Amino acid sequence: MLTASSEYWRPNGRRSEPPTSPMSAWTALLWLNGIGVLVAIVRFRSCLTMFLLNQFLVARALGNIEAYGQPISQSYLPGGIFSAANTRLAFALIACTSTIAVFFAVLPAWALSKRPSTPASLPSVPWPILVAAGLYLALFAMSSETILSSPYGGDGTLLGIHLGGGELILVYAVVLYEMYRRVAVARLAPIRALLLLLAMCVATEYLKGRTGIASGLMIGGTLLFLRPRGPSVRRVLLIVSVIGAIGVAGAATRAIRSQFSSIGSDAITSFSSSLGASERDESIAQTGQGAEAYGNGTQYAAHVLECIQLWESGTSREWRSIYLPLEYTFEPNILSGIFSFERSKEAAWELADYYIHGGGVYVVGEFYWNGGWACVLVMTTALCAFMFLCDTRCHNGGFWALMVCAFSPGLYMGIGYGFAQVSRGMFNGIWFVVGMALLSRWRRARRVGAGTVEQDTGPRHAAVPVEG
């Protein structure tokens, strides 16, 4: 765990000159992202909320790097990465991409239909699939030790079978969608659904020391479940409180997961004192980072600067990150082992060829590494437009309701782990839509063959209010 106590480490990259961008500019950027997050929450736009939350953390980290130099948690990187020229360019990148995201957060949901979300537009998941999903999650929860009994990093296998691959996100999507469907048609109270989702995340993610997918599930579930009755001051305050609690839970879990099994509650005490100390001015000045480091903000900021350094030195991925997810989708890892073929490297793995880093690659930096400003503008706009459609059309049912439940669980983590991870959620959504369509046709064919019509006598939910 990184702390600001005892002796402060002074990296070679420590600033000796004043910052090139005034701190007021970074403060304005933080306000832009903070207001964007609040607007996205008020409009119940879960995907855009996750993107802007990550942008806020990265902007905070870059502002501290601009002012104080290389952060302590990135001491293994060459000091030149944290140059004033790179941080100046990083400011422009984050400011531009945040502006695009805020635009879509503010944009009225002109495509949102007034028709209600009913069982006809939100088909139920067949009970055998729900049972299978529950069984899989139970086996997954038993496949590795918890951080209560062993350090973080269990192998996640049961009877020699590896669990927790790409299929896990699809299982989460099935559960999240069925919970959302029942909330939308008034068969499950929103708060009860949120508590059930929390229990699932605790059993399968938090107790294992994993936080990324759990954060995406909880943020997405909160904004999906609480949406049907429309915005209110009380509801918005509840959502903000829940998201804040998710952030603290994630930071605490990451901080204690390697130590809790050996020192117990002392790990929590150490985290709370370190978190408070990290926000003191003298600590930030000495370490080059604040509390954003506990939310991976500093690591993601380093990704952006590494990608800038590579592009500016003439090393480009030439847009490979944009089209290679198709290869990863149709050539999964499990088949590469069976048929002995080698897949192209994901950006995060290629970045490791140049720099030691803590894993992943922040999507904004990855876009710049792939094609400079052209790639950043095109791909950020396309990604934000897709998130806008997920957020505003999901309450109509059909395609987008299924898509958002498959796309959002891995989004919060995926933004920091590369476009391959983000696009994986899109492809999972397509598989989910196709699977549900085939199931609906099969069930319809059975009803026609039996000469019966299935009726749903459950309560119907009123139409979702259109955003102003």
Image (cartoon, rainbow, N blue to C red):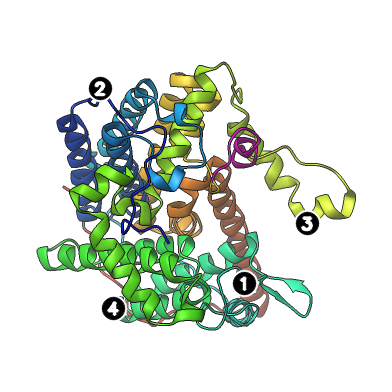
Q: Secondary structure beneath disc 1?
A: helix
Residue 122 point in image, percent of width and height: 44, 66
Q: Are marks 4 and 3 in contact (CB under 8 Å)?
A: no
> In the rendered structure, which disc, 2 or 4, sits on the residue that comes first in sequence?
2
Residue 293 position in % (x across, y down): 36, 52
**Disc 4, SS:** helix
Instruction: State the separation of the CA atoms marked 1 and 4.
Output: 31 Å
- Of label 1 and label 4, which has the lower sequence position? 4
Please report the residue visible at 56 percent of the width from the left and 56 percent of the height from the top: 433
Is residue 454 shown in magenta? no
Give the amino acid at mark 4: Ile
Kind of residue at disc 1: Arg
Q: Residue at x 47, y 46 (%)?
A: 416
Q: Looking at the rendered structure, which numbered label has been put on residue 280?
A: none
Q: What is the distance, in whole Å, between disc 3 and disc 1 at their CAs?
A: 31 Å
Q: Main secondary structure of the magenta part?
A: helix
Q: Determine which of the numbered discs, if any, sits on residue 443 in the image.
A: 1
- Image disc number at residue 20: 2
Label 4: how many residues lie within 10 Å, few (<14), some (14-19) or many (20+)?
Answer: few
Q: Magenta segment range? A: 347-357
Tag 4 residue: 191
